Amino acid sequence: MTTIDFPSPHPDHLIDALGRQHLPAPGARIVSLVPSITELLCDLGLASQLVGRTGFCIHPRALVEAIPKIGGTKDVNIGKIRKLAPTHLVVNIDENEKPTVEALAEFVPNIVVTHPLGPRDNLALARLMGGIFGAQEAAAAWCAAFEAEYAALRALPATPPRTVLYCIWQDPWMSVSDDTYIAAMLRELGWRMPVFGEGEAKRYPSFGWSQELVGQLDAVLLSTEPYRFTEAHADALEKQLGIPVFLVDGEMMSWYGSRALAGLRYLREVRAMVEGGRT
């Protein structure tokens, strides 16, 4: 009887969101289709290894301007990526489309799939990026800074639970479901999402301003992305609803990776803003 020896997992446990093992590749040629992770890779000192990024990868501006654009997060230029000859492609389950990733997998040897669902998932994300691409020390330093900010957030005195509606679009009005990264950020403040009724099971449910919905709410948050809500929108909606409405930075609330570190600080600002009322 023949015995088959299966390779043991790499000691660094570089496992992506699909459970696939990755090996360290310090000299990798990376294409990132995830704006927030492009920023993280740059902050880990890996900008020189990024050979392609989306047009939405705008941070840090001084570094990404030198990296070729390969389209958007969903409408990528496959031919252009092929010419860049990447060894690794970094993608995200929510942001990139499976057929596109499958087409790229035909010639990109390594596909690193990510899927952070909450703030603390950023620790594993940073370690994965640092471990694969040879930036372990930078990743460890980033994780230490994250833990410090997280501890400061958790040390805040408790406040009464609030029901807060986070809006990402209008015409139609849309929000986020309880299983999104944004909702997980809000839960760090002890805040919960409202019950939407019809459409509640959708990841980004649409809704109308019914008395039943408004009656549940302590506050409304209008995000600066993907819809470009402004203070004027917040003022008008507050007058319409008769409850507090606040404008919040969408990048701070929804971007994982590097932006999540600043996002933890920003959560403290948001809490103070909502608890203190409109200025």
Image (cartoon, rainbow, N blue to C red):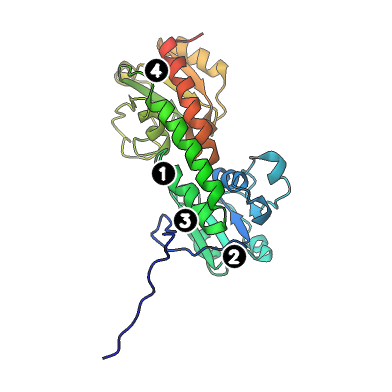
Dot 1, crowdedness within 10 Å: few (<14), some or many (≥20)?
A: some
Q: Which mark is residue 121?
A: 1
Q: How many marks?
A: 4
Label 4: which residue?
Answer: 219
- Is there CB contact under 8 Å for labels 1 and 2? no
- Is there CB contact under 8 Å for labels 3 and 1? no
Label 2: which residue?
Answer: 87
Q: Is residue 20 above or below residue 136?
A: below
What amino acid is found at the position of numbered circle 4 in the picture? Ala
Q: Nearer the viewer, residue 169 or 17?
A: 17
Asked whether, in this view, residue 198 is left or right of residue 166, the answer is: left
Sequence order check, earlier mark of 3 and 1: 3
Q: Nearer the viewer, residue 76 or 57?
A: 57
Location of the N terminus (image quadrant): bottom left
Residues at marks 4 and 3, CA–CA distance in whole angstroms = 35 Å
- Is there CB contact under 8 Å for labels 4 and 2? no
Res 34 seen here: no
What amino acid is found at the position of numbered circle 2 in the picture? Thr
**x and y percentages locating residue 11 in the rendered image:** 42, 63
- Quadrant hosting residue 203: top left
Sequence order check, earlier mark of 1 and 2: 2
Element at badge 2? loop
Dot 3, crowdedness within 10 Å: few (<14), some or many (≥20)?
A: some
Q: Is residue 239 above or below residue 192?
A: above
What amino acid is found at the position of numbered circle 3 in the picture? Val
Identity of the residue furthest to the left in this view = 1
Res 123 seen here: yes
